[in-house]
Structure formats: structure tokens, C-alpha cells
Image: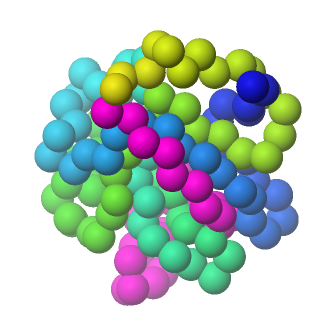
Amino acid sequence: MKIRSGFVSNSSSSSFVIIGEQITLDDIKVEDLKSKDFELIADSGESYEGDIFIEIKDKKVLEYLQENKPYLTVYKAYFSGGEDEGTELNVSKLPKKCKVWSGTMDQHSCYDLAEVKELYERDENY
């Protein structure tokens, strides 16, 4: 099976798939941020054009989210991708706890602390 790894976005929204485990912000350790085996992705919920996702890649984003405790669904994702060509996924190497989630990702998904802060300052519904 060919699948693209990583987020995909266009002028509005994109389909996505996440294969992984649902966790909480408190489950994340600082050393997890450097892992090459999985990504840490938070779903802040439905927006106008789909779900807004936050990539948790650095300590400042993690600390901001842990301190502010917004409503989030957090994933330890062993695969995330969109509707594009990509790499093959060896499902036999995935942890047994993995589940599959799919949906639509909004173009305003966040990749750094400034974007995360803007999201929560812009709209109090998150």
C-alpha cells in the first residue's frame, strides 16, 4: 500500500489518516519530542473546513498546551498522511494498540508555538 507520510494541505482542507494510539498531554515526555518512531499530534477539534491539528515537536509547544489544558485529542502517531502518493507502510511493525482515525484537516493546522498561541487567542471555542 502506498501512503504519503506527513501533513498535506491545500487552499482549504485535506483528507488525512492517523494510525497510532490515543494518549493525553500528560503522557508525553520531553524525550518523546525527538522520537523518529512516532509523531505527537493534537486534534483541537472541528473548524470551518475540518479539524485543526497541532504538531507537538518542541518543548515550548508541549509546555504551552500542558499549562493551558485546552480540549484536545492527542495521538502518538506511527503514521499520518493525506491523499497523495507516498511510502509503503509495514503494518506488521506497528504496536498492537494502534487504531486508525480519518477525517478532514483544516488548512489552519499549527506547526509552531506562535501558530498555536494565535489559534487559542483567535477563537475562544478551542
In x, y percent, where is residue 108?
Answer: 63, 65
Taking the spot 20% from the left edge, 65% from the top edge, the residue there is 69
Res. 113 in view: no
**Relative to 91, residue 126 above or below:** below
96, 67: nearer the viewer? 96
Position in image of residue 109 (x %, y %): 58, 59
Q: Residue at x 27, y 55 (%)?
A: 64
Q: Quadrant of residue 37?
A: top left
Q: Where the N terminus falls, by quadrant?
A: top right
The image shows a total of numbered marks equal to 0
Instruction: Identify the residue shown where x is 42% and y is 42%.
Output: 99
The stretch in magenta equals 97-126
| Rendered view: 119 above or below 37 | below
Q: Where's the C terminus, which quadrant? A: bottom left
Residue toward you, 75 or 68: 75
Residue 34 sits in which quadrant?
top left
Q: Is residue 71 above or below residue 101?
A: below
